[in-house]
């Protein structure tokens, strides 16, 4: 599989270049040292019945058309058209419903939304972001619409809010991957090797001090390999803005290794793949999380918003092409469900995002080693009210 910069919401994130994946993840990750859940834990994850949507997609579609057939979604991502596949698929499935997918870095989207809420000028109906800490806060503020799409009870309990304030609709992951043609017979077996001199000038990485998911990934590497590893590895690496940029450089043959970007998981068995993720081949840490999604209480198009969430969470969208948030959807062939991988640490990223003071201290430490993030934001500069 490829270095998939922002998977699509159902499987989010279109495909431009993704790490072949033997991997998992957005740049990918690492060992199949997996931690099997007990049957009891799996059963507990399975059920949260009651209060779920009972209308069919066709019924919700009719209501969305009657409402006016419009929807605005603010999505976290790395380039303007990153949600183009989602938009096209949704509009094809539901003709007459026009969805505006506004993509920007999550750290700008949440600030934009806070400003809109404060000024009474809210634009999006739906929000789907990497800034996981915002959703409990918006819930406390009463800004979110409690809503449980059909299938909510089949969502793993790490990936939803008990009251329906938010639900994760896709699993994302970050790690490392390499270009088979460029590494030849010297394919790396661990991220630890990226500090070796043989990789000088051959690595591209997203800035860990620019993206919180990459920051968390790097914090796990530093914990395992040490700060001296980072100092040496940084001398070998070109850092880029946008969590997809490193994977794009690797896939295009500009760099042998890409680090800190998106990838869709597979077992790495495709002989035609140009890029290979490192998940099954190492005991390195990687990271995975559920990208949270919610409807705003003051959404202008609540019927279309409900249709959108039900469609994303439906089994027709939650396929086994990538890891699903649902417990009743099989993982990609040859892999386990994401919560069964101990080295994915699905609890770690939400906890990391909640402690903003610790995250900022770590960001400053990373900056000492690699310098300030340089370059314009890859989605462009969208202003205060895009999509209005």
Image (cartoon, rainbow, N blue to C red):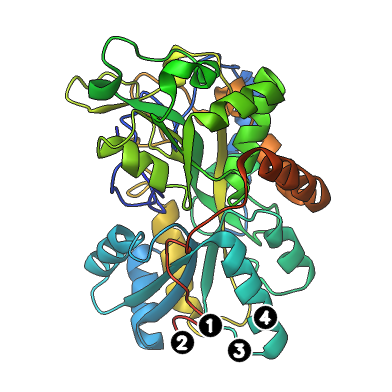
> Where does label 4 land, which residue?
115
Horizontal side of 276 relative to 261 (left or right) equals: left
Label 3 with label 2: CB-CB less than 8 Å: yes
Nearer-N-terminus badge (2/1): 1
Q: Residue furthest top?
A: 185
Q: Residue furthest left?
A: 272
Q: Residue at x 65, y 53 (%)?
A: 132
Depth check: give the residue in front, 278 or 351.
278
Q: Mark 2 to mark 4: distance in Å?
A: 14 Å
Report the disc number at residue 267.
Answer: none
> Where does label 2 land, which residue?
388
Label 3 with label 4: CB-CB less than 8 Å: no
Nearer-N-terminus badge (3/2): 3
Q: Label 2: few (<14), some or many (≥20) within 10 Å?
A: few
Q: Mark 3 to mark 2: distance in Å?
A: 9 Å
> Where does label 1 land, which residue?
123
Q: Residue at x 70, y 42 (%)?
A: 368
Label 4 with label 1: CB-CB less than 8 Å: no
Tell me: residue 24, above or below residue 282. below
Q: Secondary structure at mark 1?
A: loop
Q: Residue at x 47, y 81 (%)?
A: 386
Label 3 with label 1: CB-CB less than 8 Å: yes
Label 2 with label 4: CB-CB less than 8 Å: no
> Where does label 3 land, which residue?
121
Q: Secondary structure at mark 2?
A: loop
Q: Label 1: few (<14), some or many (≥20) within 10 Å?
A: many
């Amino acid at each position: 599989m490829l270095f998939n910069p922002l998977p699509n919401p159902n499987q989010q994130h279109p495909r431009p270049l993704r790490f072949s994946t033997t991997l998992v993840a957005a740049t990918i990750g690492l060992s199949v040292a997996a931690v099997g859940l007990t049957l009891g834990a799996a059963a507990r994850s399975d059920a949260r019945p009651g209060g779920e949507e009972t209308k069919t997609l066709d019924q919700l579609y009719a209501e969305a058309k009657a409402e006016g057939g419009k929807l605005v979604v603010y999505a976290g991502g790395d380039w303007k058209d990153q949600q183009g596949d989602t938009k096209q698929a949704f509009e094809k499935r539901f003709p007459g419903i026009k969805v505006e997918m506004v993509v920007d870095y999550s750290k700008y989207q949440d600030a934009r939304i806070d400003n809109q809420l404060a000024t009474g000028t809210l634009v999006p109906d739906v929000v789907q972001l990497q800034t996981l800490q915002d959703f409990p806060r918006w819930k406390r503020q009463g800004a979110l619409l409690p809503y449980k799409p059909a299938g909510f009870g089949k969502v793993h309990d790490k990936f939803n809010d008990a009251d329906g304030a938010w639900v994760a609709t896709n699993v994302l992951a970050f790690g490392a991957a390499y270009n088979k043609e460029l590494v030849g017979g010297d394919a790396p077996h661990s991220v630890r090797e990226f500090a070796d001199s043989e990789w000088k000038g051959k690595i591209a990485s997203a800035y860990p001090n620019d993206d919180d998911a990459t920051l968390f990934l790097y914090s796990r590497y530093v914990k395992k390999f040490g700060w001296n590893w980072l100092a040496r590895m940084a001398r070998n690496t070109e850092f880029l803005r946008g969590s997809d940029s490193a994977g794009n450089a690797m896939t295009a043959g500009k760099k042998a290794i890409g680090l800190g970007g998106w990838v869709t998981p597979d077992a790495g068995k495709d002989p035609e793949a140009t890029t290979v993720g490192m998940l099954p081949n190492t005991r390195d840490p990687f990271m995975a999380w559920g990208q949270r999604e919610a409807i705003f209480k003051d959404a202008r198009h609540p019927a279309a918003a409900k249709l959108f969430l039900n469609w994303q969470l439906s089994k027709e969208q939650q396929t086994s092409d990538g890891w699903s948030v649902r417990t009743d959807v099989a993982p990609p062939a040859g892999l386990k469900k994401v919560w069964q991988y101990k080295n994915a640490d699905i609890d770690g990223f939400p906890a990391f995002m909640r402690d903003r003071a610790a995250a900022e201290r770590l960001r400053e430490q990373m900056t000492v080693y690699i310098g300030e993030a340089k370059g314009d934001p890859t989605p462009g500069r969208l202003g205060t009210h895009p999509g209005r």
